[in-house]
Image (cartoon, rainbow, N blue to C red):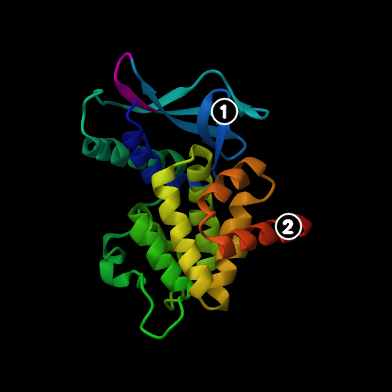
């Protein structure tokens, strides 16, 4: 299987799943997303060279053995990664219809409406700057950002990071996706070490504690990427301990 193509598809659909409280799981049937009652997965059939988007009901803690195909696309073993974008877009549209998620309106997705990805000279990074950096690294969530703006233009940043960024970080950690995790932890380290109080709290209490609490495997993976970020590593360990108590 082309791992880069698979990751592109997962990156594209994960925000739709997160908006409906689906979280990633790595089980005996492979990786899938679940909200506790249903499961969704992307599977590649090596023999027939097909990507499948599939759904199953949950039977207790695991999905039923019978998976329903929601969509399928041919993807040859030698196909370029860019060809997977069409598959990702189709799977995204299919999930929107299946889960009842309305698409963002076109007029709200202009670059001018997005937060700045860099703080002004002399200023400390804020939660909005952290969001801007996150959307630069993971542009598939740009449309979703609009859903966290109030009518007055206020950014509900805690909800955004809890519901969008944390599930994505969990998925990357579960897959040990080196390329994306390096960028994610570099981003968090910059904001934690240089940001204002609110931005630092988002990194430690929302992102790190949210993704790592009660999960030693994720913590072990995360610590590999924090070896060069000792302050972030200490913050993660402390935040997880505090979260475990409350």
Answer whether residue 115 is visible to the viewer in this image: yes
Rendered position, 191 above or below 55: below
Q: Is residue 213 left or right of residue 104?
A: right
- Asked whether residue 222 is drawn in magenta, I would say no
Q: Residues within 10 Å of mark 1 (few under 14, many from 20)?
A: some
Q: Position of residue 128 (x, y in %)?
A: 44, 72
99 or 51, nearer to the observer: 51
Q: Say which mark, if any, is on residue 188.
A: none
Q: In the image, which is nearer the foreground, mark 1 or mark 2? A: 2
Q: Which residue sits furthest bottom?
A: 122
Residue 207 located left or right of residue 74: right
Whether residue 149 is visible, yes or no, is no
Q: Is residue 4 above or below residue 162?
A: above
For mark 1, give the secondary structure: strand
Image position, residue 132 (x, y; %): 38, 67
Q: Residue at x 62, y 27 (%)?
A: 62
Q: Where does the image place residue 227, in percent across and percent down from the top left?
A: 54, 54
Q: Secondary structure at mark 2?
A: helix
Quadrant in which the N terminus appears: top left
66 or 181, nearer to the observer: 181
Q: Nearest the camera: 181 or 33?
A: 181
Residue at horizontal 69%, vertical 61%?
A: 238
* Mark 2 residue crowding within 10 angstroms, few (<14) / some (14–19) / many (20+): some
Q: Which corner quadrant of the image does residue 46 belong to?
A: top left
Q: Which disc, if any, is residue 57?
A: 1
Residue 49 in magenta stretch: yes
Identify the residue under disc 2: 241
At a point 78% along the width and 58% down the height, the residue shown is 245
Give, as a single range, the part of the protein colored magenta: 47-52
Going from N to C along the chain, the mark reached first, 1 or 2, is 1
Question: Which quadrant is home to the C terminus?
Answer: bottom right
| Mark 1–mark 2 distance (CA, rounded to whole Å) | 34 Å
């Amino acid at each position: 299987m082309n791992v880069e193509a698979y990751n592109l598809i997962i990156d594209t659909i994960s925000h739709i799943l997160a908006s409906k409280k689906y979280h990633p799981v790595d089980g005996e049937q492979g990786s899938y997303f679940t909200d506790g009652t249903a499961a969704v997965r992307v599977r590649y059939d090596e023999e027939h060279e097909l990507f499948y988007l599939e759904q199953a009901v949950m039977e207790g803690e695991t999905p039923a053995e019978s998976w329903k195909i929601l969509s399928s696309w041919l993807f040859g073993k030698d196909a370029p990664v860019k060809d997977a974008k069409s598959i990702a877009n189709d799977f995204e549209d299919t999930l929107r219809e299946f889960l009842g998620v309305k698409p963002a309106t076109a007029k709200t997705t202009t670059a001018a409406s997005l937060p700045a990805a860099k703080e002004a000279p002399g200023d400390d990074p804020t939660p909005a700057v952290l969001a801007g950096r996150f959307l630069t690294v993971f542009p598939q969530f740009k449309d979703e950002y609009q859903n966290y703006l109030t009518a007055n233009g206020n950014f509900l940043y805690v909800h955004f990071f809890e519901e969008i960024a944390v599930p994505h970080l969990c998925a990357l950690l579960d897959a040990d996706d080196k390329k994306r995790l390096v960028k994610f932890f570099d981003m968090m380290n910059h904001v934690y070490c240089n940001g204002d109080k609110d931005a630092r709290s988002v990194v430690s209490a929302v992102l790190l504690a949210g993704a790592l609490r009660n999960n030693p495997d994720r913590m072990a993976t995360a610590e590999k990427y924090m070896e060069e970020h000792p302050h972030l590593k200490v913050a993660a360990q402390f935040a997880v301990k505090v979260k475990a108590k409350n």
